[in-house]
Amino acid sequence: MKRGHPELSPSTSLGPPPSGIKYYPEVLAAGDAQFFRKVFDHYSGRTNQTLEERGASPIIHLKKLNIWINSPLCPTGG
């Protein structure tokens, strides 16, 4: 058992989830659907930013620090 998930035999393996989206209908309640719709609408309404616009962010230094700290902790799958 890895990370609290039961082992599946190769014949019962379902493979990777489609497009990396995790969906758990058993925990989706009516209130959650409204919340998810609100989040979806927020991120769908955002426009793409240029590198210059992202670099002008007031928290860009914190973002870079976070990436620098996490880089040895989260190695790439290479």
Image (spheres, rainbow, N blue to C red):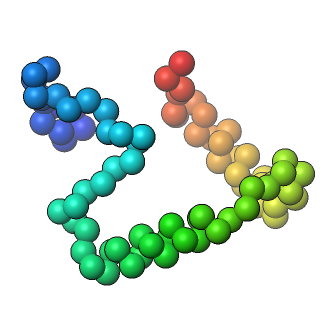
- The residue sitting at 41% across, 41% down in the picture is 20
Q: How many marks?
A: 0
From the viewer's perspective, is residue 45 above or below residue 30?
Answer: above
Q: In this view, does 45 lie above or below 67?
A: below
Give above or below for 2 relative to 36. Answer: above
8 and 63: which one is in front? 8
Q: Can residue 55 be seen in this view?
A: no
Left or right of 51 in this view: 26: left
Quadrant where the N terminus is found in the figure: top left
Q: Which residue is drawn at 59% across and 64% down?
A: 43
* Residue 13 at x, y percent in the picture: 17, 28
Residue 12 visible, this angle: yes
Quarter-of-image position of residue 16? top left
Q: In which quarter of the image is residue 23?
A: bottom left
Q: Position of residue 48 (x, y in %)?
A: 75, 56
Q: In which quarter of the image is the C terminus?
A: top right
Give the left or right position of residue 3, taking residue 19 as reference: left
Identify the residue at image location x=55%, y=71%: 41
Residue at image location 73% in from the left, 46% down from the top? 64
x, y percentage for residue 49?
79, 55
Depicted 42 relative to depicted 2: above or below:
below
